[in-house]
Amino acid sequence: MAVKRILLSEAEPGMELANDIYDGTGRLIVPYGTILNKMIIERMEEYKIIIIRINIKEDENRQKYNDIYQQPGYFEKIKETEDFKNFSKTFHTSVDEFKSMLNDIVVKNTEVDLGRMLEDVNNIIESNKTGNSMLDVLNCMRGYDDLTYVHSMNVALICNMIAGWLDYSEKDTYILTAAGLLHDIGKVKIPKEIISKPGKLTDPEYEIIKNHTVYGYEILKDCPIDQRIKNAALMHHERYDGRGYPGRLRGNLIDEMARIVAVADVYDAMTADRVYREGICPFDVIGYFQNEISVYDPRYLLLFLEKTAETYVSNKVLLNNGTEAKILMINKAALGRPVVMTGEEIIDLSKKKELKISKLL
């Protein structure tokens, strides 16, 4: 396999990226191995990307790979079900109600009614009769508006799921779900033109965005709600290695709820409002997170990644060499690179660095 450096203006649908693409703030935009399409190329243009690297393959599997890749995948199949369409209606009705309540808290200074807010979360949970995990269903929502309100609802749902994995009590599950729901309330005070900006943020704009953690705490600090919910609003961008904001707190100085919300927040941010939102492969996200193990509390991050990866055991996948495979088992030391079977051959992807999962089928 050869790597070629080209101008973005020369990029064409079907090409495969040979490097990760980041924006000016260091956020991953498009991961290595992504197959380019028109939407991805246009969005990279919006981020002012000039040069990319692509993989050049000269094997007979390339056309086969492209043909398979263009077929409806795992998430596309979920979207076509009646159960998902019903779920989507409930989700958007609940988000609209949540948006109204959140704006009333910030603009009209109304009381925080956690019971009413979490009723909307529970309605969404109960409406998921698709037979798929909540993460899968949320991945199918990526074609919709991914602004503050949808993102906050997604984070609440992911936090609720993590609480179940941790065997939290009913009270702590309630608190963690509410912390996820209100973690970004401070963004309501950030100018919409900055929140919704499609291109790269300037340094001053990024500094304004960062203020949402302090704004969120200020909005919630006098509310009669659990202190851990307030701390999550303030601390969800703190990082376990001390490189976060606003206080550069480290390790257990960060509230436990905030450490969990941080994992849910970044997972949803990586899989939402990105150029590869259609048909994203969760194993790209898992691999990225595993390389960032020092940044998040490993107890919660590893649990999240392991549970997410286990969801896809027995799933059919497409490898980047054009081969269809089936996931047999997860490598705990390399969660983004499971053991797969292709025909009669068993392949440990942790030992075959040139291979990766491109798409769930």
Image: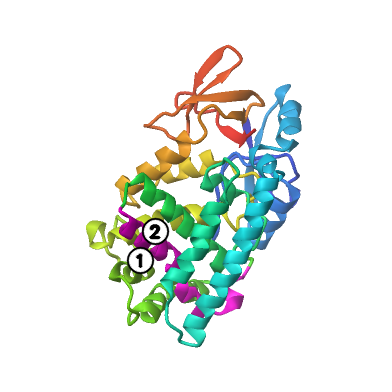
Callout 1 crowding tier (Cα within 10 Å): few <14, some 14–19, many ≥20: many
Find residue 302 and report its image quarter. top left
Q: Disc 2, disc 1: CB below 8 Å?
A: yes
* Residue type beneath disc 2: Val
Figure coloring: rainbow
Residue of label 1: 232
User: Residue 31 location in percent, x, y?
Assistant: 56, 45
Tell me the element at label 2: helix
The image position of residue 181, as x and y in percent, is: 45, 65
Question: Magenta stretch?
Answer: 169-197
Q: Quadrant of the N terminus?
A: top right
Nearer to us in this view, 111 or 297: 111
Residue type, label 1: Ala
Is residue 223 within the magenta segment?
A: no
Find the residue positioned furthest to the bottom. Answer: 108
For the stretch drawn in magenta, what is the main secondary structure? helix
Where residue 165 sits: x, y (%)? 37, 45
Residue at coordinates 33% horizontally, 56% vertically from top-left? 170
Q: Is residue 76 left or right of residue 104?
A: right
At 49% across and 58% down in the image, what residue appears?
Answer: 122
Q: Say left or right for 6 vs 221.
A: right
What residue lies at 64% left-to-right and 23% top-to-bottom?
Answer: 323
In the image shown, does 283 or 48 lie closer to the viewer? 283
Local packing at callout 2 (Cα closer than 10 Å; few below 14, some 14-19, many 20+) is many
Counting from the top left corner in percent of width and height, residue 351 is at 45, 23
Distance of mark 2 from mark 1, alpha carbons?
7 Å
Residue at the image position 50 percent from the left and 29 percent from the top: 313
The vertical placement of 281 against 297, above or below, is above
Residue occupied by mark 2: 261
Numbered circles on residues, count: 2
Q: Quadrant of the C terminus?
A: top right
Residue 247 found in image quarter: bottom left
